[in-house]
Image: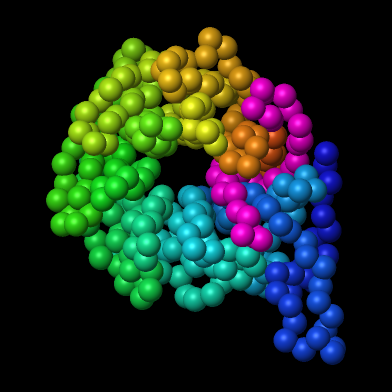
């Protein structure tokens, strides 16, 4: 544990670590540093410090900080809500900065200028082929309505943006077949966009939807929470299972302690859904529970418990659970890694407010 690589070492190798030199007579081929990594978003502080990327090397169980700055020799200048990797390109959705940065997924070097035209408060990313769909909150006059929110449809070959109007504060997005499912954070509805014609229909839910996963049978699971503007009873929050063939609700699993951000992830075999529980503010107690997909039963006790969990992820290689802890918006946080049985196997310091992770195989 606590094996932190030298920042200067990473800076020295950043430009060459993933590529062989064009002139081997003067520049020998450098030793490869990474094979499989977890890119961790340190959100920073919305009104203060900006985001940075930490790289957790899953082979050596070690972490490197300030990876974007090392790769580009400049500070990142906005706050990243989430990142996604599609066809070896990493996309950074900066909700404070109103842009989507495009970087090489292997080196983290910025390849082109950010997409900023028609991008306002981007949140989450889904893609199919050469087209991406990003939830955007837009210009907000009334947070209880978010009348100006939309989906940014991006042609990834040209980076040209087309806006699909979608009031209601879109958050999590996922593509199933020819439909884009969108969680709307100011309603008790999931929007379903037909990607052939952009027609929109809705699925009613018991509470406010936030994020999605798909299980082994192809059914959609959505987290459901209570919010300040759309309060619901504790008997309505948790997760809902939906059949995307008919867009009908199959089951609801009650989880009264679900966190307000509705973070959920699924195991590699897609038979277990993990959900983040958080005590209502100002409490700080946090937990991760599991749901058995075949039986649709929530675990009786927490798999992992702690304080001030800020997000988590599941490594698809081994189902290790990466939990992010943020003590405040001004001090470094930490990463705790647990196996699927809930045993702690590593702990590392991160940057400020770690919250999101994407796993990437550099050698693929």
Q: Main secondary structure of the magenta part?
A: strand
Indicate left or right for 23 with 162 as reference: right
Q: Position of residue 85 (x, y in %)?
A: 51, 57
Q: Is residue 71 above or below residue 214?
A: below
**Residue 330, picture quadrant:** top right
Q: Is residue 151 above or below residue 224?
A: below
Q: Nearer the viewer, residue 35 or 181?
A: 35
Q: Position of residue 82 (x, y in %)?
A: 49, 50
Q: Position of residue 54 (x, y in %)?
A: 67, 53
- Residue at position x 33%, y 48% from top? 175
Indicate left or right for 26 with 282 as reference: right
Asked if residue 361 lies in the magenta stretch, the reply is yes
- Residue at position x 29%, y 43% from top? 181
Range covered by the magenta-colored residues: 338-364
Residue with the most extreme front position: 217
Q: Nearer the viewer, residue 218 or 347?
A: 218
Indicate left or right for 212 with 272 as reference: left
Quarter of the figure with the N terminus: top right
**Residue 241, picture quadrant:** top left
- Residue at position x 67%, y 23% from top? 342
The number of numbered badges drawn on the structure is 0
Q: Is residue 327 above or below residue 297?
A: below
Whether residue 86 is visible, yes or no, is yes
Q: Is residue 178 above or below residue 225?
A: below
Q: Position of residue 130 (x, y in %)?
A: 37, 66
- Residue at position x 74%, y 28% from top? 344
Tell me, what colour scheme is on the image?
Answer: rainbow
Quarter of the figure with the C terminus: bottom right
Asked if residue 263 lies in the magenta stretch, the reply is no
Whether residue 75 is visible, yes or no, is no
Indicate left or right for 335 with 46 as reference: right
């Amino acid at each position: 544990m606590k094996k932190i690589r030298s920042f200067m070492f990473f800076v020295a190798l950043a430009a060459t670590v993933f590529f062989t030199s064009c002139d081997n007579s003067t520049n020998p081929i450098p030793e490869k540093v990474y094979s499989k990594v977890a890119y961790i978003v340190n959100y920073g502080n919305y009104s203060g410090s900006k985001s940075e990327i930490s790289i957790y090397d899953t082979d050596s169980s070690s972490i490197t900080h300030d990876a974007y700055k090392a790769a580009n020799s400049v500070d990142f200048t906005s706050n990243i809500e989430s990142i996604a990797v599609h066809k070896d390109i990493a996309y950074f959705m900066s909700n404070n900065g109103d842009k989507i940065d495009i970087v090489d997924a292997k080196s983290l070097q910025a390849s082109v200028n950010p997409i900023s035209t028609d991008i306002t408060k981007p949140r989450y990313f889904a893609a199919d082929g050469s087209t991406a769909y990003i939830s955007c909150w837009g210009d907000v006059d009334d947070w209880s309505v978010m009348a100006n929110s939309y989906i940014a449809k991006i042609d990834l070959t040209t980076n040209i943006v087309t806006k699909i109007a979608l009031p209601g504060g879109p958050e999590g997005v996922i593509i199933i077949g020819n439909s884009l499912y969108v969680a709307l954070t100011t309603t008790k509805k999931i929007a379903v966009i037909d990607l052939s014609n952009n027609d929109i229909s809705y699925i009613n839910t018991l509470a406010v939807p936030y994020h999605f996963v798909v299980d082994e049978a192809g059914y959609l699971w959505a987290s459901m929470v209570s919010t300040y503007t759309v309060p619901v009873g504790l008997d309505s929050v948790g997760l809902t299972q939906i059949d995307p063939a008919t867009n009908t609700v199959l089951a609801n699993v009650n989880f009264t302690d679900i966190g307000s951000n509705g973070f959920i992830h699924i195991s590699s075999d897609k038979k277990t859904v993990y959900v983040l529980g958080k005590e209502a503010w100002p409490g700080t107690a946090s937990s991760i529970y599991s749901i058995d997909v075949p039986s649709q039963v929530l675990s009786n006790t927490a798999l992992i418990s702690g304080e001030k969990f800020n997000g988590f992820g599941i490594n698809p290689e081994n189902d290790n659970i990466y939990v992010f802890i943020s003590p405040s918006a001004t001090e470094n946080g930490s990463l705790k890694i647990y196996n699927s049985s809930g045993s702690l196997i590593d702990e590392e310091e991160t940057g400020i407010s770690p919250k999101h992770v994407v796993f990437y195989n550099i050698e693929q």
